[in-house]
Image (cartoon, rainbow, N blue to C red):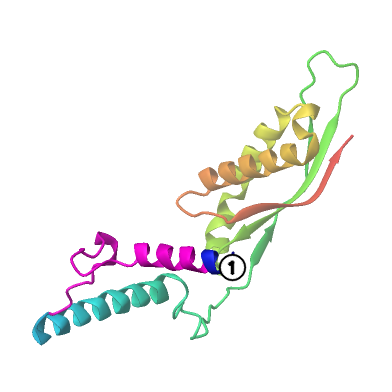
Amino acid sequence: MAAAKAKQAEAEVEDETPEEGDEQPAAKKKWNLKLPPLKWMIIAAAGLLVLGGGGGAAYYFFGGNSGHDKPVQTVQKPAIFVDLPDVLVNLSNAGADRTQYLKVKVVLEVPDPGVVEQIKPLMPRVMDAFQTYLRELRPTDLDGSAGLYRLKEELTRRVNAAVSPNHITAVLFKEIVVQ
């Protein structure tokens, strides 16, 4: 019985091998790589150019020489502050029983010392802008950090309008009291 199985296995192997008259299957065809040397050099040069260009682009876009090699020295100007007199106003209260007051101590931040001398003669205009704006505020306008931020931005805008063509950098609060 073992001999019969061996003969059957040999017959199957012979069926799988192609005979001399049979053609090779299409999947086993070889590539025709017979090109002249000049074309091979052109193909190789094009491939190197593509790889080199891609590598150079990757180096440029993903952190090659990002400008951190040379230390950047920036000269910071010292901050210059101008104190303003304290402002005490009563807040607008439509129908409230008691009057509430707002006391504010403000400092102006200016970009350079020359602006300070140009702003000093205009201080009555700045104080008038503060007084007229602050008197129209309601106590609810000053609630929370968002209210104080809006107050700071509005005061900065009004001071810049009063001292135009000069400008200030910011209005800074030293003290804010609502009674």
| Vertical comparison of 19 with 136: above or below | below
| Vertical comparison of 101 with 163: above or below | above
Which image quarter holds the N terminus? bottom right
Residue at the spot 53% in from the left edge and 78% down from the top edge: 74
* Label 1 neighbour load within 10 Å: few <14, some 14-19, many 20+: few
Classify residue 21 as left or right of residue 141.
Answer: left
Kind of residue indicated by mark 1: Ala
Is disc 1 placed on a helix, strand or loop? Answer: helix
Which residue is under mark 1? 2
Of residues 69 and 35, the one drawn nearer to the viewer in this rendering: 35
| Vertical comparison of 133 with 164: above or below | above
State the image quarter where residue 129 is shown. top right
| Vertical comparison of 146 with 160: above or below | above
Classify residue 123 as left or right of residue 137.
Answer: left
Task: List x then y, in percent, for residue 153.
Answer: 63, 43
Tally the numbered discs: 1
Task: List x then y, in percent, for residue 171.
Answer: 66, 51
Task: List x then y, in percent, for residue 15.
Answer: 35, 62
Residue at the spot 25% in from the left edge and 67% down from the top edge: 19
Residue lying furthest top in this view?
Answer: 95
Which image quarter holds the C terminus? top right
Residue at the spot 80% in from the left edge and 37% down from the top edge: 144
State the image quarter where residue 11 is shown. bottom left
Magenta segment includes 33: yes
Task: List x then y, in percent, for residue 58.
Answer: 40, 72
Q: Which residues are magenta?
A: 6-34
Residue at the spot 80% in from the left edge and 28% down from the top edge: 139
Of residues 3 and 39, the one drawn nearer to the viewer in this rendering: 3
